Amino acid sequence: MKIGFIGCGNMASAMIGGILEKGICSKQEIIVSNRTVEGNERSKKNLGVNVTLDNCQVVRETKTVVLAVKPQFYEEVIAQVKGLITEKHVIISIAPGKTLRWLEEKFGKPVKIVRTMPNTPALVGEGMTGVCANSYVQDIEMAGIKEILGSFGRYEVIPERLMDVVVSVSGSSPAYVFMFIEAMADAAVADGMPRAQAYEFAAQAVMGSAKMVLETGKHPGELKDMVCSPGGTTIEAVRQLEKGGFRSSIIEAMKACVEVGRKM
């Protein structure tokens, strides 16, 4: 399998890292395009893959093409390459807000399109990706896409109507989690813990808690109750969080995220 990436920022680099680590492709079977010579030099140095400044070359040399540019550049890039897209190509989108219908309209002809929403934990092999496809994508092709997505984390096939929700619950949510870790570390520092140590304690607590949700299958509320002893320290911390509108703030932030995603 040869794979092409139009754009090679953090998300594309994370995907390529997983693909290489799992042996889905060799470095020689991947080509990426960047807007600048400096970008190509960075991709070549960090990933060891083939590089080009020509988006059309990526399409000519591969049949699986990942559109890994920012959403505002999608229309421009599609206009450049659509004349080279054939019935043998599969296009993978990673942009929020760009629906399958919108993408099909911009290509102006029947094109196999897979819409995905990965997240930055893919950089460490712990990504979460939502995925859906149009009717032109065959089962065998979808199996290959799933193999790619599984190389850098977990994935779930979902109806497209939920893709904007995926943006808020996993695509953007690492930022909320990082803020949470930072806040916990700040509090620990305020109480005398060295900052590097505080980050380690906070980050490990978040990672371990997430693993408990995934591996025990227990409801998060049940797991929370397991930590809250009557009259203890944890329930007092929970009381203060609720007093400050902790859960409501998260819900409202995520709803705002969905609304922005739908307008992109």
Image (cartoon, helix red, strand yellow):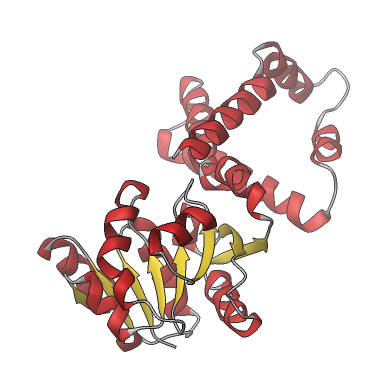
Q: Where does the image place residue 67, in percent across and percent down from the top left?
A: 38, 63
- Residue 106: quadrant of the picture: bottom left
Looking at the image, residue 48 lies above or below residue 251? below
Q: Nearer the viewer, residue 197 or 18?
A: 18
Question: What is the quadrant of the N terminus in the image?
Answer: bottom left
Q: Quadrant of residue 46?
A: bottom left
Most extreme residue toward the top is 243
Position of 132 relative to 244 (above/below): below
Is 75 left or right of 25, judged from the image as shown?
A: left
Whole-percent x, y for residue 32 in the image? 28, 72
**Residue at image location 62% in from the left, 64% down from the top:** 154
> Looking at the rendering, in which quadrant would you find the C terminus?
top left
Above or below, 73 against 249 in this view is below
Residue 48 visible from this viewpoint: no
Q: Is 160 placed left or right of 193 in the picture? A: right
Residue at (27, 55) in percent of width and height: 76
Toward the viewer: 54 or 52? 54
Q: Position of residue 118 (x, y in %)?
A: 51, 57
**Total numbered labels:** 0
Q: Position of residue 206 (x, y in %)?
A: 61, 43
Left or right of residue 101, residue 206 in this image: right
Answer whether residue 171 is visible to the viewer in this image. Answer: yes
